[in-house]
Amino acid sequence: MITAKLSAVDKLQRLVQWVGDGQPLTTNGHLRLADARYLVETLHTGDEEFAGTHQHHQRVRSSADLWNLQDLLGWAKTARLVKVEHRRLLPVKKNAHQAEDPQRLRNALLKSLQTSPKAYLGRYHFLSYFHEDADLGHQAMWENCPTEAGGDPVPVAEIAGAVWYALIEHDDDPPQGAHLKDCQHLVQRDVTYLLARYADLGVLCLSQDKKTVTLTEFGATWAAEQFNPHAFELRIALDGVTHPKVWRRLHVPDHWTVDDLGRALEDVMGWHEGRGRLLSIAGRTYADQWEWQAQCEARAVTLDRVLEAGQRLRFVYDLEEAEWRHTVSVERRFPQPGLLFPARCVDGAGNCPPEDCDGPDSYARLKLALADTGPDRGEKISYILGYDLDDDFDPEAFTTTAANARLRGEG
C-alpha cells in the first residue's frame, strides 16, 4: 500500500503535474523505467528499494513490477485524472480543475473509493470477494465505523467481520469449504485497504498498529453530507436525434453538486472529450468552462437546492462547435436505501454520436453513410467526420452496463 510520507492528495497532485500535457509509455503500455524511478523517489510510493533508486544496480526490468506506483496510477485513472491513449499517459482535461485544488482533488478521490474497487484494491481488484457487491460492503463498513469524531476506537477486525457477514448473507451462491476461509481473509484484507485509503484522505484515523480506527472532524462532516439517503431520477434526451432516439435514465445523489451532475451527464450519454458543457437550471447557467462565476457556482451548489420533481433543465455539450443540446427531466426525488450511493444508469437507448459529428444534421448524414454498402462508403464517413470511424460503430448500441462503467470511470 501507499506509504504515509505524503498524503494521497499530495501524491496525486504531483503525479498529474508530472504528466503535464502527456508522457510517453513503452510498447507494453507501461511507464518508462527512468520515469518510474523518478516518480518512486518524488512521490515516496514505497517502491524505492525495488526501483533501485538508492542502489547502483537495477532490480526490476519494468515499471509494472513497482506495485505501489502502479496502484497509485490506477487510482489516478479511476478518479478520471489521467488516461492512456496511443501509448501515452495523458491528463483528462475536463477534470484538470480537480487536480489544481486540493479540496476538489480529495473529493474526487473519495468519490472514486465509492464507485470502483480498483481505487483501493489496485492490483488485487481482480482477486476479491468484496467487489462482488461493493455497495453492500461499503454500507456494512460504514454502519460499523465510528459515528462521532474523536469517539471510541473501533477494531478493524470488527468492521471487517461485519462486512463479511453482510456479504455472505446476501450471496445466493456462497463459497464453501476451504474457499470460504480464503474469501473471509480476502474481505479482511480488502476492508483494511479501504480503511487505509480513507485514512490517507483524512476521513478516518488508523492507530499506529492499524488495528483500530476513529473518525476525524473532517470525516464527520463528510459523512453527514454523504449519508443522505435520497436521490433524483432524471431522464436525459438528446435533442434533434431520431432513428434511433438517444436517451438515458439516471439516478444521482441529491447531495451532489451541479458540477458533479454535469460530469455524470457527459459520462452516461457517452461524451468523453470534455469539450465544454453548461447546464441551465431555473434560469441560471452553470458551466465548467465559459465564465469564472458560472464555474464556481457549479462546484458549490448542491442538487437538493436547485432541483425538484417535474422540473426541466437544459444541458449543452461541446460549446465551441456542435453544441449538442439535451433536455433533462427531473422525474422524481426518492428515498435511496444505503449509505454511499453512486450515480447509476437504469435505462436508456441509442448510441452516443461520435465526438466530431457536428450536430444532429451531420449525424443524420453519418447514419445514411453507415447504411451505405457502396465502395465509397468509407470516403463518405471520413468526409463527414474528418477521420475513419471504427467499423463496429452501431447507432443502436446501448447497454446500462457500459453506461455505468463510464460513470465509475472504467469506460
Image (cartoon, rainbow, N blue to C red):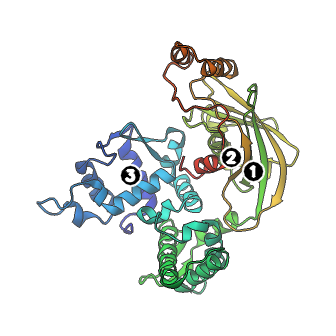
Residue found at x 72% / y 57%: 255
Q: Which residue type carries mark 3?
A: Arg
Q: Label 3 belongs to which residue? A: 14
As measured in the structure, the alpha-carbon distance from the residue carrying label 3 to the one carrying label 1 is 31 Å
Residue found at x 75% / y 55%: 254
Q: Say which quarter of the image contains residue 131.
A: bottom right
Q: Callout 3: few (<14), some (14-19), or many (20+) C-alpha neighbours within 10 Å? A: some
Q: Is residue 302 above or below residue 380?
A: below
Labelled disc at residue 303: 1
Q: Which residue type carries mark 1?
A: Leu
Q: Label 2 belongs to which residue? A: 261
Q: Depth-wise, is mark 2 or mark 1 nearer the camera? A: 2
Point out residue 140 in the picture as x, y percentages from the top left corner: 64, 76
Q: Callout 2: few (<14), some (14-19), or many (20+) C-alpha neighbours within 10 Å? A: many
* Residue, far left: 56
Point out residue 184 in the picture as x, y percentages from the top left corner: 52, 81
Q: Say which quarter of the image contains residue 229.
A: bottom right
Residue found at x 31% / y 46%: 28
Would residue 203 be seen by someone viewing this image from the given angle? no
Q: Which residue type carries mark 2?
A: Leu
Q: Quadrant of the N terminus?
A: bottom left
- Horizontal relation, residue 165 to residue 232: left or right: left
**Element type where label 3 sits in the image:** helix
Residue found at x 66% / y 65%: 340
Q: Is residue 65 above or below residue 147?
A: above
Q: Are marks 2 and 3 in contact (CB under 8 Å)?
A: no
Q: Which comes before the other along the chain, label 3 or label 1?
A: 3
Q: Which comes before the other along the chain, label 2 or label 3?
A: 3
